Image (cartoon, coloured by chain):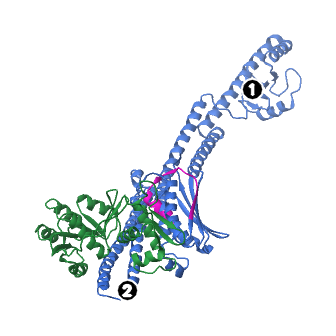
Amino acid sequence: MHRLFFKLFFGFLGFTLASMALSVMLAFTASKGPWGEHRQRVRHERQEMFRQTVELYGYGAVAVLRDEGLEGYLDYRKRFLEKMRTRTWLLYPDLQTVSGDSLPEPVQEVLALFSDRAEGGVRFMEREIIVVAPFFHGGESWLMTGLLPMPHHAERPIFRFPKDLGIRFWSSILLAVILCWAIARHITGPIARLRSATRTVAEGNLSVRVAPYMGKRQDELGLLARDFDTMTGRMADLLDARDRLLRDISHELRSPLARMAVALELARKGGGDPGALVRMEMEMERLNTMIGEILTLARLSSGDGGGVVCASLDFSKLVMDVVADADFEAQGQNRSVIFSGEEGLVMEGSSTLLHRAVENVVRNALRYTPEEGEVRVSLTLEGREAVLRVTDPGPGVPDEEIPRLFEPFYRVHDDRDRRTGGVGLGLAITGQALRRHGGSVGAYNMDNGFCVVIRLPVTVKE
Amino acid sequence: MLHILVIDDDRELTALLAEYLEPEGFEVEGVHDGADGLERALAGVADLVVLDVMMPGMGGLEVLRKLRSRSSLPVIMLTAKGEDVDRIVGLEIGADDYLSKPFNPRELVARIRAVLRRSGRDGEGAGLPEETRPVEMGDVRMYPGSRRALRGGEVVTLTMVEFDLLALFLAHAGETISRERLSTEVLGRPLGPYDRSVDVHVSSLRRKLGSRPDGVERIRAIRGVGYLYAFTGGE
């Protein structure tokens, strides 16, 4: 339904969120930029802190060593180990430990790296920190190394948001959602409106306009809307011109017919050939019927609603009336029309038009019914539709010609239909009238006959 | 001679009508434009106006409106539109009758006479045949001369063919009349194969008359033969 909208919305949103995430990641991991600098500073300060601590402790250690000798120093060192869980080694400038024990492997490596540096150094290991701090005490140079356990949260590799980032994070995501929604709406809204307008046009209403809904948009969609309006306006003009032409032609044709009718009577008075005059009169009647039906069809096909008066009507009763009349006529010709089905199907519509639509189909069926045959009319309610089936035991219609059955001036068997007096417009009128009411008409061949199916939306089942 | 004013932009039709109506005892004056027609109608010469609805310039409905504001001259409207709207508007404005083109001139003559009779203008020398006695059957009454039919005192609007059918039925009430006979006598032509026009006309006549007050169908189809008009015993 709104697939484009969702595509756009989630597309934009995904893109926005991805780029947000990417920029955050970059900000946190890049060595350059403000965050990188901050991190570096923190790291440096921390290292400095460790170094100074170890250096200060070295001072203390040297002082203790001088005052209390090796005993005192070892004691001091042990206390340190217990209190701070830090192993330390005080080194002479030649890198010999004062305590005489040997240095662990990693400490030795770090020492080799930093020992010749005046400021010493700090190395963060997996779980511990190794600090090398050279210092002077009483004119002598000493080296203090320490192996500290890694304090909690010191430098986890997993990155962690600062605490106050939560609200900012969520609000920016919300903002992204709102913005993407708005952008997607901005693009798909007009498209939806154009689409509904197109559907309205397809239903035959050409008075629909979309530009007023587009505001002052000057973009491609706004232009499209304006072009759409121009197009429908042009189409409406063309259709109106066509209908006007049909009406005018029909009207103009009636004038010569009126003259012919008078001339015919004059010829009768003058004692013309009665056979020829009767023939002329029949042909005139036929022309007149045809003109009337063309007018009806033009009115029905025109886009202006065609003056369909809508009122609530009892469709069942309407069908039964048609059947009663048709049956009455059929009786005289040894045929019959039989009705069966639902009563009390009510719908909105024009009773004149629907009467005509149903009557055309029933009369048509009767036309192809042989002597002693019967036309069956059945009315059922299927879902929200009234379904009317008119079946006749006639010869039917070649399958490939069925779709053309409801087109104007179409005849199945040219010669035969001439004799039956049809002008080939009845079923076209039926089709148009039903479409006007939101219904449809179709037909199919049966084993022994032909069936026309009419479907119409029903309002209520009383 | 009764003076008929025909206002129609179709000159040839006016000429033909004049040719047809004069032997029937009418003097025809043709005018081909609405404004002139109105002027002639108000001049007080004519006994009846036959007025075309569709005319360039001042249309028939406008002519009728202006005429009615000053005169009650009988008017029969002609229209080629065949749309009910025109007829209703025309009758509302005050047309006395209405015919749609193409029409049968015999029908026009009958309507002219009927309108003249109703308006009391059928003076001397109208060339009218003797008004035949009305034919009655139950609640249906028919005046052959003015081609009017009444049911229960109300006018039933019938076409020419329907009127002729009714006349034939009433003359032979209670008998079955074959479709062949109906075709030859009323439509003036033999019944052809697949010819269903007789049945359509009978059907619409039946619909217009409706069933009798006692619920009995007036016209019955006799299967495979023809039709029968139910006889109602004389009171």
Residue topped by disc 1:
A133
Q: Which chain is the one coloured green?
A: B
The residue at the point 53 percent across, 48 percent down is A184
Q: Earlier in the sequence, mark 2 or mark 1?
A: 1
Residue A274 is tagged as: 2
Question: Which residues fall within the magenta stretch?
Answer: A337-360
Residue B184, percent from left and from top: 42, 79
Residue A54, percent from left and from top: 74, 22
Give yes or no for residue A345 being in the magenta stretch: yes
Real-space CA distance between mark 2 and mark 1, rounded to the nearest whole angstrom: 139 Å
Left or right: A13 in relation to A106: left
Residue A267, percent from left and from top: 31, 85
The residue at the point 64 percent across, 33 percent down is A39
Give yes or no for residue B40 being in the magenta stretch: no
Q: Within 10 Å of the Cα at label 1, are there few (<14), some (14-19), or many (20+) other Cα atoms?
A: many
> Three-letter amino acid code at disc 1?
Ala
Which picture quadrant has residue A151?
Answer: top right
Q: Nearer the viewer, residue A155 or A120?
A: A155
> Three-letter amino acid code at disc 2?
Pro
Name the outermost residue toward the left: B43
> Circle 1 — which element?
strand
